[in-house]
Image (cartoon, helix red, strand yellow):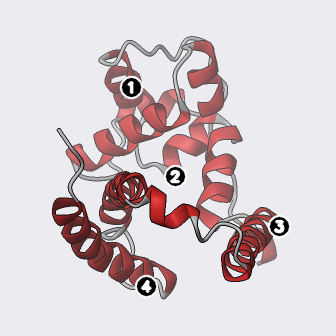
Amino acid sequence: MKLNRNLVTPFIAFIFVPVGASGVLMFFHLADGFTEVLHEILGLTFVFFAFLHVAINWKSMRSHFGKTNFVVAAATATILSAGLIVLERAQLPVDLIILEKVATAPISDSFRVLEIDHIEAATALSKKGIKLDGAETIEDIWVKNDSSPEEVVETLVYEARRRGGPEVNEEASRSLPPARDTMAERIE
């Protein structure tokens, strides 16, 4: 099939609208949790059609490569992108910090945070072929099972939500060590 400008251009134009709008919503933290998937999937689609657009218009675009405006635009985009990546690395997102803390905390504390008891966690994970055997942290679970952090945490969170909350059965609560005191209790 020959690439057709009449097909590619409308797709780029109309995909830009939700990608741009969701990017603005994400920047201002409006509708957090609802816009990420839309932005990511349509962003990939936008990239696909942008490559098609470049392929269709390659001959005319090549004439711009040596021009000052093109060089300035390319350098600005590169410097801005690198700067934003450096800034992001300097100030890690809170959700990554929290996930790392939950993953490396004692497993009983992590289960409390995720509102799931040990037995339910073991059952939910075993359905995915993941075992708790000797794991002291959630990180141990995915390392020992050659799994991923996302798969383990998402399985646990899904199971806790599915059953509706932090109800811990008596047998499981007896097998867990007592909860650590909170920061507020230590201050009082």
Helix, strand or loop under label 3: helix
Helix, strand or loop under label 4: helix
Q: Residue at x 60, y 50 (%)?
A: 99
* Distance from the alpha carbon under mark 4 to that under mark 3: 22 Å
* Distance from the alpha carbon under mark 2 to that under mark 1: 15 Å
* Distance from the alpha carbon under mark 4 to that under mark 1: 43 Å
Q: Residue at x 68, y 57 (%)?
A: 97
Query: For the residues carrying marks 2 and 3, which lies nearer the camera in this image?
Result: 3
Query: Could you tell which of marks 4 and 2 lies nearer the N-terminus?
Result: 4
Question: Tag 1: residue type?
Answer: Ile
For label 3, the residue is 90
Q: Residue at x 50, y 41 (%)?
A: 111
Dividing the picture into quadrants, the one containing residue 23 is: bottom left
Question: Tag 2: residue type?
Answer: Val
Tell me, yes or no, whether the two marked residues, 4 and 2, touch with CB atoms within 8 Å: no
Measuring from the top left, give residue 77's x and y in whole percent: 68, 73
Please tell me which residue lies in front, 49 or 24.
49
Measuring from the top left, give residue 144's x and y in whole percent: 61, 14
How packed mark 2 is, by other alpha carbons closer than 10 Å (few <14, some 14-19, many 20 or more), is few
Query: Could you tell which of marks 3 and 1 lies nearer the N-terminus?
Result: 3
For label 2, the residue is 113
What is the quadrant of the C terminus in the image?
Answer: bottom right
Measuring from the top left, give residue 148's x and y in whole percent: 53, 28
Which numbered marker is on residue 26? none
Q: Does residue 18 lie above or below 41 as drawn?
A: below
Please tell me which residue lies in front, 186 or 95.
95
Please tell me which residue lies in front, 53 or 153.
53
How packed mark 4 is, by other alpha carbons closer than 10 Å (few <14, some 14-19, many 20 or more), is few
Measuring from the top left, give residue 87's x and y in whole percent: 79, 72
Question: Tag 3: residue type?
Answer: Ala
For label 1, the residue is 119
